Amino acid sequence: MGTPLDQSPSTEGEEYNSGLAPYARWTPMSADIWADTVVTMLENYESRNGFVPNFVEIWNEPDRREFYNGDIADYLEVYTATSQKIKFRWPEIQVGGMGLAGYRSEMGGTQSAILSLIDHAAANNLPLDFVSWHHYTIANGLQYSGFLEEVRQRLSSYNMSEVKLIISEWNIYPSPNAEFDRGHNAANYAGFQTTARELGLDGNIMFVLQDITRGNASIGDFTGNGMGSITEHGIKKPAFHVIEAIQAMSSEPMLTTIRPENELSVNVYATKMGNRVRYVVSNDSVPGEWVWANRLRDAGLAPGYLWTLYSNASENNGNSHRPTNVELLDEGMAELEITAIREIEDELNMSWIFKGKDRPVEIVFGGDQLPSISNVRRFDSTHNNFADRVEEIMPYLVQTEENAKWYAQNEAADYLGTYGIIVSPEELALYDDIQQWALENDVPQGIVSSAISVYQKSFAEGRLFDVDLLNHLPQMSVNSMTAREANVTSVAGSVAFQMEPNSVVIFDLYL
């Protein structure tokens, strides 16, 4: 919620396209008063709904200037007051923080702010039921970072191993992109969930479930304007079909899989029920940019600065090429930096090659029995790629949109009628929006604002009325294949197939 205006020490601050207002980003003048405000909000929530949330995360992304301009010491002061007051009022609420945007963020300290929070809670005997951060990167970021183990070791040193580790937001990117409509989002979901379950992450929240913005498009489905796993009209994207598959496997025993060393793209999630093993194999391709940035940052170097030097050197003396040591030295790069780059060049080249090329995958399970493979589902550029077929169902979407609009106009008209304001849905339909109609008819603004809220909520509900029909259209239905059709081959003890970058293969194997 940020800092209320009357509790903020200033209204000054940089304006951002997103985030909180400048006054809301300042540390409150009194942490105690801010904590009391949070308690009051929770009491109001309880009064409206009859219950309180199970978890309360104190602040959101305080390491981003769009949300907070204090440092770690300021944050810990707020956390101290708020965690104690919430726990005193509702012992059952799980209290924690801090929804850190990046697990490395130090917020002016000397270590990850998550670790600073743990140290502070331990030293002051504060409530701390969970620690949380966000994850917008490759699926295997958790595996690569080793951060979960670092946090667990710190908690263990204080006998606080019961504290939960939660990623409270995650997805491929933190803003809309066409990749959310295609196999990439499915691959990222499957890979992340596989890694999260292997590493024992206590909880995670994918952001978000449904598309809520459409940009300038008249119909928003599969336009690249949303981050959801279902469209605004409820059509399941590849990611949601993978979500359903993995959730259906959650009650089955998970099999242990061993990946090759330094494998960061391909993940295998497998469960067994009777003589059937179900596999969800994801290829969330690791971009070369990610390899460069993370490998060099972990070596204590500056990736951005070095990329500028490397790019300049590669373009000297003619066409773009792999620069020599002499060329890198001439650009001002140190021997240590050159050595670090040479050590990652093979991995870089592999990333760039497989960014646009299918890669072979083999799963070895041992034994001498030839398996039977069935129910193969691919999610890639040529299989179950619903975004490429949305134009074929546009008449259905247009009709659904019109029906939803009519429903919303009826609901708004009914609401206005409760105030004695008689207007028909047909009359509302003559105007661009309810606000325009209200201005011409001198309707009090308070009533108008509530009517607009009723209209918007009803419109969103109406868009989902035909969800079953839309998802059962042939163009939007998942097609399963035989192993032969899907080019999945098997011999005794193993299966093999090719995978596109950012794709998923699901299949059942019987022994």
Image (tube, rainbow, N blue to C red):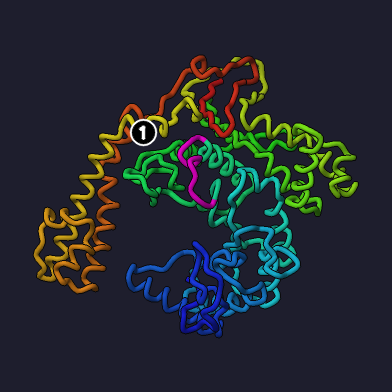
Task: Examine the rendered structure and indicate whether residue 82 appears above or below residue 175.
Answer: below
Residue 183 position in % (x across, y down): 50, 35
The structure residue drawn at horizontal position 51% and vertical position 51%, both measured from the top left corner, is: 175
Residue 233 showing in the rendered view? no
The location of residue 184, given as percent across then percent down, is: 53, 37
Which residue is the site of mark 1? Answer: 390
Q: Quadrant of the C terminus?
A: top right
Residue at 70 percent across and 54 percent down: it is 147
Q: Residue at the spot x=54%, y=28% of the render?
A: 277
Query: Image quadrant of residue 265?
Result: top right
The residue at the point 32 percent across, 29 percent down is 392
The stretch in magenta equals 174-183
Please indicate whether residue 344 sits to the left or right of residue 472 in the image: right
Q: Position of residue 355 (x, y in %)?
A: 63, 32
Q: Secondary structure at mark 1?
A: helix
Disc 1 marks a residue whose amino acid type is Val
Q: Badge 1, how many Cα within 10 Å: few under 14, some, many 20+?
A: some
Q: Quadrant of residue 72?
A: bottom right
Q: Is residue 108 above or below residue 258?
A: below
Horizontal relation, residue 33 to residue 323: left or right: left
Magenta segment: does it hold 127? no
x and y percentages locating residue 337 in the rendered image:
85, 48
The residue positioned farthest toward the front in the image shown: 318
Q: How many marks?
A: 1
Q: Is residue 361 above or below residue 235?
A: above
**The stretch drawn in magenta includes residue 180:** yes
Q: Is residue 466 visible?
A: yes
